[in-house]
Image (cartoon, rainbow, N blue to C red):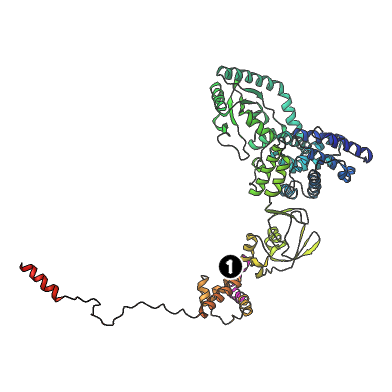
Amino acid sequence: MAALSAALGEALVREWQDHAGADVAWPVLADTLDALALLSADEGTLAAALLFDLPTLRPRIGALPWDSAQRRQAVEGLLDGQDAADQVWALHAGREAGRNSEGLRRLLLAIIHDLRVVPILLARQLAKMRAATGLPESERRALAQLTRDIHAPLANRLGIWQLKWELEDLAFRNLEPDTYRRIAREVDETRVERERYIESVKRTLSQALAAQGIDAEVSGRPKHIYSIWRKMQKKRLAFDQLYDIRAVRLMVEDVAACYATLGVVHALWAPIPSEFDDYIARPKANDYRSLHTAVVGPEGRTVEIQIRTYEMHAQAELGVAAHWKYKEGGKGAEKAFDRKITWMRQLLEQSQEGDAAELAVALDAELVEDRVYALTPRGEVIDLPQGATPLDFAYHVHTMVGHRCRGAKVNGRIVPLTYRLRSGDRVEIMTAKEADPRRDWLLPANGFLASGRSRDKVRAWFHKLDRARNVQAGKDLLDRELKRLGLQHADLAPMARKFHADSVDDLYIQVALGDTGPSQVSRALLEAERAASQPPAPPLPRPTARRNNLGQSKFTVQRSEERFRRNAETEKG
């Protein structure tokens, strides 16, 4: 609560005294605020979390002493984002566990306009999981399933490790209680011996590093139950075969010291070559940087050692924009989606420096989502390009659903097939018994399809038809266009050559399949007619030499008799 101004805090207390409601889960609310404080949440984020969990105060938001109208509007936006998230939780509750979780995560981020909502959701879910022991088993499992499918992967993607590990462990404990207890028991049974061993390793490392003049902080690395189980599953190992249960972290001042420390470690104990990773020279996709090595340590036991700078450690603990599927074994997300998460990380970082409001404004300008996340009647999320229509939706569900599509309802209302879908729309496709796509679906100007993938499916359908049907269909389309312009008697042979068709029939097939539009052909015909109807320009005159009085010179030579005589006399003398 320290991030709330005194005036706002007092006003909230006053309003609660006057408009108190019942059934407030105070421990959950307090835990939520504590987790947000751990993330250095700003005043607006804390206020939005409070007002959402105290719904009787929400109508009083206008009476609270905000320092500006912009701040109040930002809090209202955060409340709207939490309302939108409740819709995603409801969708998750009504579907098969674990199915299409990625789609729901994408839908969540698509419909939330201010991404500062995400830390609120993570903090509240962690608080609920901590308090879940008193819930009936069915409710506890449903809460854990939601945590595993949505919240823990988002925390992982944002790199909010402080919340990620606990969310994963709490979800695992409720979904796989027997396995959790077995691993926890094995960890507990070996704890004393493991801690003794780690202390011995730490002393040896500290002495060796000091002897080389390297100042390092040496500590043991905690291992979490869920991560241990994942490693056992991935490597198909028993608990006692996992060497990274014994793990040490070394933190130094700079990168040069990281590599110097690595040299000391490998000089002390024999490294295991297959277990060395240089994430400083080659950072992970989430910009994670550290040196990872494993060595055969004292008593012949394997030890995992992580080496990083203090700056790298701080960055990792704060969180980075990571591909959540890097850990989950799936394909990467689209660049626009990654860019949104990158901005989310910057927003979390900047909130500690007081620039969160400025960056939040930049979010609105920069993060134009280029995907649409629509819903089937059963709540499955369909990922579509921006500008997608119900017909695109139908083809994405299944090719034959698209071929048989005759109409659509969006949010219970009949809409044209050219309707532009928005994230969160629930779409119901109305189909005929027989597949019968229309050729005008292929024309971009008609606006039926925004996806090239959908157009390819329609085009493939018509490719399967026999040549004669395609020729006739293309001829009908083109004749209709040419009659409209009075060009029905035009010679199409030059047009076939222009559009690289071997014959007029092949041009008709191009039109039928949507490769060439009727308007393209008519436009080319009009241009050809216009060029033919213009009179030819008269030839430019060629310059010619005049031939009159050929051979006559314009110059004459006159010789004076007197001058001739005088010159002759001079020569004699």
Residue 288 in view: yes
Residue for point 55% across, 21% down: 268
Under circle 1, the secondary element is loop
Q: Nearer the viewer, residue 481 or 226?
A: 481
**Disc 1 target residue:** 515
Residue 256 location in percent, x, y? 55, 27
Residue 501 in view: no
Q: Is residue 239 above or below residue 24?
A: above
Q: Main secondary structure of the magenta part?
A: helix
- Whether the magenta-drawn stretch holds residue 89 is answered as no
Q: Is residue 34 above or below residue 138?
A: above
Provide the residue span drawn in magenta: 460-475
| Quadrant (top left, top right, bottom left, bottom right) of the N terminus | top right
Count residues near mark 1 (Cα–Cα under 10 Å), then give few for <14, some for 14-19, many for 20+.
Answer: some
19 left or right, relative to 314: right
Q: Nearer the viewer, residue 210 or 190?
A: 210
Residue 128 location in percent, x, y? 82, 37
